[in-house]
Image (spheres, helix red, strand yellow):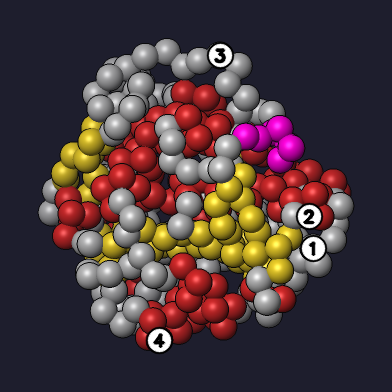
Amino acid sequence: MANQKAVPGSGGDCYIPYAERTGEESVVYFTRDLSAEGLLKIFQRVKGPLAGKIAIKLHTGEPHGPNIIPRPWVENLIKKELPQASIVETNTYYEGGRYTTEEHRKTLEVNGWTFCPVDIMDEDGTVNLPVQEGKWFTEMSMGGHITEYDSLYVLNHFKGHTQRGFGGTNKNIEIGCADGRIGKCAIHTTPGSDDMWDIAKEEFMERMTESAKAVADHFGEHITFVNVLRNMSVSCDCEGTAAMPVVTPNIGILASTDILAVDQASIDLVYALQEADHKDLVERIESRHGLRQLTYMKELHMGNDRYRLLDIDHQDAVIAPADAVEGVVPFGSDQ
């Protein structure tokens, strides 16, 4: 693993308007339908790349976590579309309800993830995946079972995060696939440091993004991404019942085969909310320099930050980012 210095002023606290972005556009699908049926409908738009043995990367939450994606939504999707798939997770770096495999399985039962197989991928060891073009890593330690799958469906609850600013698809696979002792340590902690959380801001965003790139590159074309913008606390689901209250309105569900486009569109829709509605989440994102996740994904050629947002509720009408900013998009509430 390589170590370098972060580039100062990398823009992690500065939102880049759509008009200032360059490059190609990807397709991102959008629905306001926050329900089991809405999740099923939008999955059908991006399921094409999935084949063979399919893993579902989902944050299953700490015990009794209040904001995770509703279990009945996921159960409905698996039964109708992915009956042979497994949910995949890894153990945590911090002590808690998912620190060991034994504790993790107890938490899965408490939270109701009992209707399909759940593979704790680092239960039997680790595997190193290469990091292409990285400046911090040449490889990343992942849960060893990751290589047993042909495709990855990334189902993510979009929210804030104490360290990352926001938890999007990038976060879901970078820390969610890295194993609990080696990979997560490499992302979070300077070797020899007494502070396990000492890496922050630009450097942290870059490290985590390189881990996500290792996962995305491993699955190649056989990976697809969904962000559920609901119950968006400024806290991550890893905080469980200690999460801060939800004050950001629900928005909808986004899906794409482009990891950068789906996270960028999610951020854009949050910024498109009225200031009173998004100020807490935006403050959390910018104070942690979370937007560096997006610019670094672009530097690593992981996708496009320009996109066509297709409204599947209205026959795939194109929603221009300018329309979103002006409040034309009628955001939905939970159903």
Check disc 1 and report the residue beneath it: 329
What residue is shown at x 43% (from left), y 51% (from top)? 172
Q: Earlier in the sequence, mark 4 or mark 2?
A: 4
Q: Are marks 3 and 2 in contact (CB under 8 Å)?
A: no
Instruction: Residue 298: tell me if it is visible.
Output: yes
Comparing labels 3 and 2, the label whose residue is closer to the camera:
2
Q: Is residue 334 above or below residue 238?
A: below
Q: Is residue 290 above or below residue 231?
A: above
Check disc 3 and report the residue beneath it: 8
Q: Which residues are magenta?
A: 16-22
Q: Earlier in the sequence, mark 3 or mark 1?
A: 3
Q: Is residue 103 above or below residue 199?
A: below
Check disc 2 and report the residue beneath it: 324
- Type of amino acid at the residue the image marks with label 4: Lys
- Type of amino acid at the residue the image marks with label 3: Pro
User: As rendered, which of 39 and 22 lies closer to the eye?
Assistant: 22
- Helix, strand or loop under label 2: helix
Check disc 4 and report the residue beneath it: 80
Name of the residue lying farthest toward the front: 24
- Quadrant assignment, res 332: bottom right
Q: Earlier in the sequence, mark 4 or mark 3?
A: 3
Give the number of callouts. Answer: 4
- Helix, strand or loop under label 4: helix
